[in-house]
Amino acid sequence: MDEIKLVHFGLGPIGIGLVKYVLQKNGIKIVGAVDIDKSKVGKDLGDLAVGRKIGVKITDDASSLLARTKPDIVLHSTGSYLKTVRPQLFDIIDARADLISTCEELSYPFLKHPDIAKELNARARRKGVTLLGTGVNPGFVMDTLVITSTGVCQDVRKISSFRIQDASVRRLPFQRKIGAGLTLTEFKAKVADGTIKHVGFAESIAMIAAALGWKLDRIEEKVDPKVAEKSVASEHIKVEPGQAAGVDQTAWGIRKGEKVITLNLQAYIGCPEPRETILIEGDPPIDLTIKGGIHGDIATAAVVVNCIPRVINAQPGLATMKDLPLPSAWFGHPKMFVKKN
Amino acid sequence: MDEIKLVHFGLGPIGIGLVKYVLQKNGIKIVGAVDIDKSKVGKDLGDLAVGRKIGVKITDDASSLLARTKPDIVLHSTGSYLKTVRPQLFDIIDARADLISTCEELSYPFLKHPDIAKELNARARRKGVTLLGTGVNPGFVMDTLVITSTGVCQDVRKISSFRIQDASVRRLPFQRKIGAGLTLTEFKAKVADGTIKHVGFAESIAMIAAALGWKLDRIEEKVDPKVAEKSVASEHIKVEPGQAAGVDQTAWGIRKGEKVITLNLQAYIGCPEPRETILIEGDPPIDLTIKGGIHGDIATAAVVVNCIPRVINAQPGLATMKDLPLPSAWFGHPKMFVKKN
């Protein structure tokens, strides 16, 4: 293998983040890019992502592109829900390309979509390709890092993971997505229609439970506003006291009637102490904090691209982060990390 | 597989810790135990480890025991140095048993002992077994957890990992091993003759570098006393001001003349703020701390036993933590975690 031939599928903010990181890597050749947005089709991918031409025209015809370019791997980033992205994943599998997707529900689809999971796994095996759903969350901070941390425990009774984020430093669409600046009535309406909701808690909880061998009764979830106590502002949005400064979302994995896994995400403007915290009640107990937190957009692109060699090396089928070797940054030519067949 | 047949090889403090944890697990049957200590041979393993008989007599004849009991896996804990334990590892491999060892140099033997690594790998492949060296350090906190943390990074410039331990709460042999209560002259003599030295830094650094694709110029190491500024004491040892309260050991991985990996272990009596800290200068930067640290003896037994299903599932050969799936605690019967062939 001299170069990995790669196609970018989906060019929203996350997809563009992937392009930027891939362009920094040696030994990966971008052979195509797909997006359905008519304003992007026909443009040069480099113009869109980094302000210089790279000779890759964006197309909306995925099937033709995949057939023509025969990529080794596709980075897919078009949506959070498996039912929506399923036909796209099928196209990629049928083109016999390995596939890493930021689709949140693909990170651990066995719980909510066992039929689609089975179907994807069977098809991927038949075509000899691997697919993986990952990112920073789900994919790393509230599942991979939690599971890894339990590796030093002889007993685990309860797990809590907190992601406390300062939304002020994030892009405007992110600040809008978490409801910053809305009245509480507006916020509740957007929760009710599903607009404000982090997707991936159920997947992270199910992955943790599977790693530990815990059978859960059920998973519960709730989305609340983080109400501003005083006036706070980002570059883009001003939040008055009593309005939503952002989101405060919690999910629980319940086992034998007890909340044994708790995931809590708070993302709001004016957050004084952003961090990632993992608490394990166990033997030994673990009290882990990443001060300042992990920058979501940079980290998602990192996790996806860093997983490329592992996905290429993996057995065909539907993979999850818990079954692949340790995630790791890697530098230099990917052939140093890809096993010879 | 109804039960995993397991042999304990080496019954020092770490080996006994392994026995205690294994006895808590379902689906693992201890079929034998080996130690060369004449005062242990002939005794019941349960009497030695947990104060009740379990019907397993300790023997010093490893070869006969392995041939007779045909274990699926052996937990090995007799020494830190590969040259010393090499014949024992060969006996285990030749008995066609998988093998997890706390031998520090086995955790990443490719740098210091490439010939032994090659030999072990070839022999393990030929016999169809997997061997792994692991523990809390090396094996987890200064390599596995560091590598995993880089998974969210697009760039990594420097890595530091600090293990700051309060020796007061550890067993007496540990307190002696780190030189607590020695004069500085006595301490230096024990450093010079190799008695005071954590083994495993070179292995952890080499594993991190291999994961990242960094070619190192060399690894440097130094062992200093942590000098008591005031009088401190554990249950067992009193340290006067000016004496060694414990050890302060540092190792560096040097690349293009620069110290890009720094591992520092401080273990001493009177440590006010025990912790594990990982700092990554990168994009994004990572500032991770485990408050209170991770209890070494409990964690080492946890990591070893928690890796059993992963080692059974792995391809034959010499495995390392960086190549196996995420470490994880697991509960319930191991057949839930062992792949069917």
Image (cartoon, coloured by chain):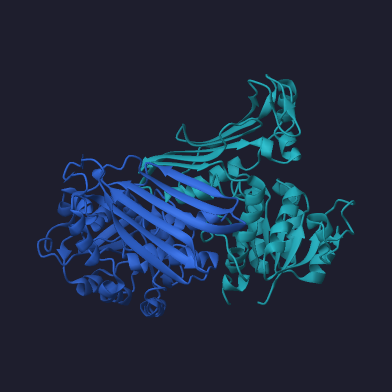
Chain colours: A cyan, B blue
State the quadrant of the N terminus of chain A. Answer: bottom right
Counting from the top left corner in percent of width and height, residue A117 is at: 64, 53
Above or below, comparing residue A105 to residue A95 in the picture:
above
- Left or right, B288 with reference to A168: left
Rendering coords of residue A24 (x, y %): 69, 63
Considering only vertical position in the picture, is A127 above or below B53? below
Q: Nearer the viewer, residue A193 or B231?
A: B231
Spot occupied by residue B64 in the image (x, y as percentages of width and height): 20, 74
Q: Position of residue A279 (x, y in %)?
A: 45, 39
Tell me the quarter of the picture where residue A305 sits. Answer: bottom right
Res B340 seen here = no
Q: Is residue B328 visible?
A: yes
Please tell me which residue is depicted at 64% across the width and 56% down the height of the picture: A304
Residue at (68% x, 61% y) in the render: A99
Residue in the image at 89% along x and 51% along y: A39
The residue that appears at 33% across and 51% down in the rendered structure is B266
Residue B60 shown left or right of residue B155 in the figure: left
